Amino acid sequence: MNELANLDCNIAIVGGGASGFFAAANLDLKASGLSCKLFEGASKPLAKVRVSGGGRCNVTHHEFDVNRLVEHYPRGHRELRGPFSRFQPRDMIQWLESRGVHTKVETDGRMFPVSNDSGDIVRCLMRSVEAAGVSLILGYRLATVDYNAISKVFMLGFKNGTTIRCQRLILATGGHSSGLQVAKKLGHTIVEPTPSLFTFNVKDDRLHGLSGMSFEHVDLKLRIGKKTFTQSGPLLITHWGLSGPAILKLSAWAAKDLAEVDYQGFLEIDFAPQEARVDVEERFHQLKLENGSKQCGNLQCNLVPRRYWQQLVKVLKLEDKKMAHVGKRELLTLAQEMKQASFQFHGKSTNKDEFVTAGGVKTNEVDMKSMESKRVPGLFFTGEILNIDGVTGGFNFQNAWTSGYLCAMRLNEIQS
């Protein structure tokens, strides 16, 4: 699919990720007789699609109510109502099925190809782009873009020294600085990008030796200045601290505020959100009455996994203490550890399946019906380059599909 000659084109797409490919796949070039080229700096396109969901590709989410769907976007929830009314997860599922890729929904709402192979999504997109008549050019990294307002022509310069001209330009470069710098040069305001969907680095004796342990459902609370962020869901202990869906979602909603405090603070965890504090205190009181001769470390506390309980009482120096000798203050401490355990975090780590940034081109400078710039005619933005990001679960891909689709529909319209 590579073409190394005659690179001038009517439409240039820069960025071979989900949104760039989807825009290309939905162009109707044969009817218009126009040409389009898709430029990707890497040797392989669709890198995020390939690794998403552990190689299974969490292609979208089984949420078809637009009002609920937009609630999963910390930045962009208001702006996405209109776009999602035109192309939402249900439409994406139908688009894939019409091309022979069938999907399934898991219990948490995430959607994957039935094959559990991201390669099916990659191959579908590659075939669709080729069928649309779009040429894929690999190994071309964008360096500069100039725009002639009189001739309405874009001049693209690549790091290998190549320059091309085009009448329409789609920037689908994600959070990469190259696309953001070009957008700024062309007159757009950039919200400074910061990481989103990351894990918290925690060094705490209560977590020692427990990497891989998961908790089915916890409540999280994070206070930054006068702001309080909360989140619920599964939690995972890792080698470097705390992760899992609840942590990733919390990091997304608090992304900007966490960046301002250099990712330092305290995280409060409720390991027993289904029980009131007074009931947990009563539970430990009963444990003491019914198991007076047993050592704390040998008890079965049903609020947390057994190994976590054993590590907790070890840290609290209660491991070998018989329950009959556990005092009232110590019982209250155990209840506190179940309902309001505080963990200090120092820094963050990138989640292996998510590479998402909060920030980008301000959405009020973009026509969200078509993804076209309000400042530069013929310039379009799709995907993560916009100041839009979702929580984990297929939502960022859906923004990519939707913005790419709307961009393509607008180009088809003005070319027809």
Image (spheres, grey):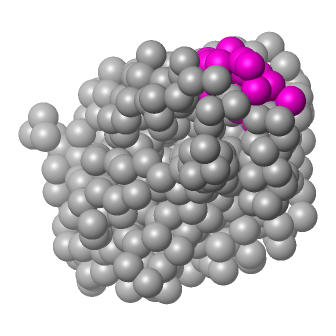
Q: Residue at x 18, y 44 (%)?
A: 158
Is residue 291 magenta-colored? yes
Q: Position of residue 320 (x, y in %)?
A: 54, 18
- First to last magenta residue range: 290-309
- Looking at the image, which is closer to me, 28 or 104? 104
Q: Considering only vertical position in the picture, is 18 above or below 138?
A: below
Q: Residue at x 80, y 25 (%)?
A: 291
Image point (49%, 48%), residue name: 197
**Residue sitting at the far left:** 161
Residue 404 image position (x, y, % from top left): 60, 55
Whether residue 331 is situated above or below residue 153 in the rendered picture:
above
* Magenta residue check for 295: yes
Total marks drawn? 0
Q: Main secondary structure of the magenta part?
A: loop
Whether residue 58 appears in this view of the structure is: no
Question: At 48% across and 24% down in the image, what residue appears?
Answer: 314
Quadrant in which the C terminus is drawn: bottom right
| Above-or-below relation of 6 to 383 | above
Q: Quadrant of residue 187?
A: bottom left
Frontmost residue, 323 versus 332: 323
Q: Quadrant of residue 45?
A: top left
